[in-house]
Image (cartoon, grey):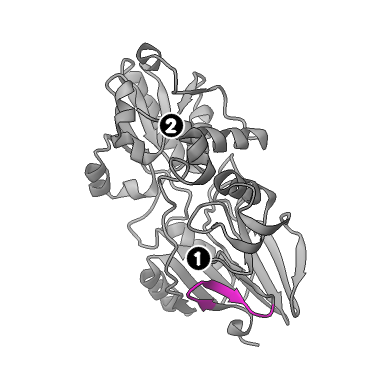
């Protein structure tokens, strides 16, 4: 039994012919297994979708009730048999709420498609679960040695120090609407900040969903309707694109911040006009990627979406068999998610 007899890369994504499904397909297919709710992995239009309940809910919030022909919710650890002898199991990926690695087993061979993942603690989602396997399919978003994210608590400390230093200025934190925004809020609360945190309209629907799933985020208020005086000294969470929009002019002398692993590259911060870059990522950094690969015990590694060549090179230096998948369509989650995309944008997108 070869790994390619179970899973095979195609232009539409990784396909399991024995099970009759694709994992995170980049185009509509008859049956899709989805690792998490970000728009580069979770697309509308599939005939059938299997995912965790949270991912299905998030897809419904984004795309509407008819985002797929049929849906099936799967719990972490639940084994499901599909097609001709394929068995799939979902395991926590630690990326965002509901995110999962998908283990596919047939004839004694196990392949784990990790989707996007991180191995560091995150109070807003289930922690990453290491799964021993024969083949590990890893992301490589930050698959270069320069990307070492550091301590997220320390990054939030920089934000709160600036808030204390400039009490008359608002602080706008750009963050992706699914996962990053909620994690940043949770980190701010962990640091002891108990004042209201303000939300751009595009953040409200998903953030309120997190709260309904039991994620405690403290007092949250909508920016919409707040006076300029009320926003002085406040922290507001918004899509990264909003930092440069007319929307930001309602704030008194705002300090622009952006929470992303890409803020490790100072040139990116300068290009965006970000005054206070925060290196906080929901993806594994170089150390996390290499440590996870080693810990899975997999002798063969498939690398997808990101710095594939560098990670493949590292794997081969460790004596592992490795290959890039070269599937087009994955990347950093769309920073405009929730602003103009699907139902969320229609309901909560803000105007100047």
Q: Main secondary structure of the magenta part?
A: strand
Q: x, y percentage for residue 186? A: 53, 33
Label 1 environment density (alpha carbons within 10 Å; few <14, some 14–19, many ≥20): many
Would you say residue 121 is visible in this rendering?
no
Give the vertical position of 182 relative to 162 (above or below): below
Q: Earlier in the sequence, mark 1 or mark 2?
A: 1
174 and 57: which is toward the camera: 57
Instruction: Give the extent of the magenta segment.
Output: 9-18
Residue 325, horizontal then vertical, whole percent:
46, 75
| Residue in view at x 61 percent, y 30 percent | 216
Q: Vertical placement of 210 versus 44: above or below?
A: above
117 to the left or right of 166: right
Q: Are marks 1 and 2 in contact (CB under 8 Å)?
A: no
Going by the image, does 19 lie left or right of 63? right
Horizontal relation, residue 239 to residue 217: left or right: left
Q: Which mark is residue 237?
A: 2
Residue 86 in sight in this render = yes
| Identity of the residue furthest to the bottom in this view | 1
Mark 1 to mark 2 CA distance (whole Å): 29 Å
Q: Nearer the viewer, residue 260 or 332?
A: 332
Q: Where is residue 208 shown, x and y percent of the image?
A: 59, 32
Q: Nearer the viewer, residue 1 or 121?
A: 1
Q: Which mark is residue 26?
A: 1
Secondary structure beneath dot 2 equals strand
């Amino acid at each position: 039994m070869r790994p390619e007899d179970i899973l095979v890369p195609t232009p539409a994504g990784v396909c399991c012919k024995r099970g009759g499904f694709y994992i995170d397909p980049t185009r509509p297919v008859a049956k899709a297994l989805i690792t998490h709710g970000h728009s580069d992995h979770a697309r509308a239009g599939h005939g059938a979708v299997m995912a965790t309940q949270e991912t299905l809910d998030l897809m419904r919030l984004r795309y509407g009730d008819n985002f797929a022909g049929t849906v099936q919710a799967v719990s972490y650890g639940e084994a499901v048999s599909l097609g001709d002898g394929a068995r799939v199991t979902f395991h926590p990926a630690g990326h965002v709420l509901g995110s999962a690695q998908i283990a596919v087993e047939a004839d004694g061979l196990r392949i784990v498609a990790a989707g996007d993942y991180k191995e560091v603690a995150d109070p807003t989602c289930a922690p990453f679960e290491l799964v021993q396997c024969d083949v590990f399919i890893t992301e490589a978003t930050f698959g270069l040695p320069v990307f070492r994210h550091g301590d997220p608590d320390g990054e939030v400390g920089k934000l709160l120090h600036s808030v204390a230093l400039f009490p008359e200025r608002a602080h706008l934190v750009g963050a992706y609407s699914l996962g990053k925004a909620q994690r940043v809020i949770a980190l701010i609360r962990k640091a002891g900040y108990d004042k209201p945190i303000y939300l751009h309209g595009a953040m409200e629907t998903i953030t309120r969903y997190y709260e309904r799933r039991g994620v405690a985020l403290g007092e949250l208020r909508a920016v919409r309707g707040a006076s300029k005086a009320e926003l002085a000294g406040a922290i507001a969470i918004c899509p990264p694109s909003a930092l440069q929009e007319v929307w930001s002019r309602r704030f008194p002398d705002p300090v622009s911040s952006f929470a992303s692993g890409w803020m490790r590259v100072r040139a990116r911060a300068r290009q965006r006009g970000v005054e206070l870059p925060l290196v906080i990522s929901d993806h594994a950094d170089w150390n996390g990627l290499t440590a996870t690969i080693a810990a899975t015990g997999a002798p063969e590694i498939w690398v997808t979406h990101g710095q594939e060549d560098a990670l493949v090179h590292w794997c081969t230096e460790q004596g592992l068999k490795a290959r890039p998948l070269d599937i087009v369509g994955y990347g950093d989650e769309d920073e405009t998610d929730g602003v103009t995309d699907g139902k969320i944008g229609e309901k909560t997108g803000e105007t100047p």
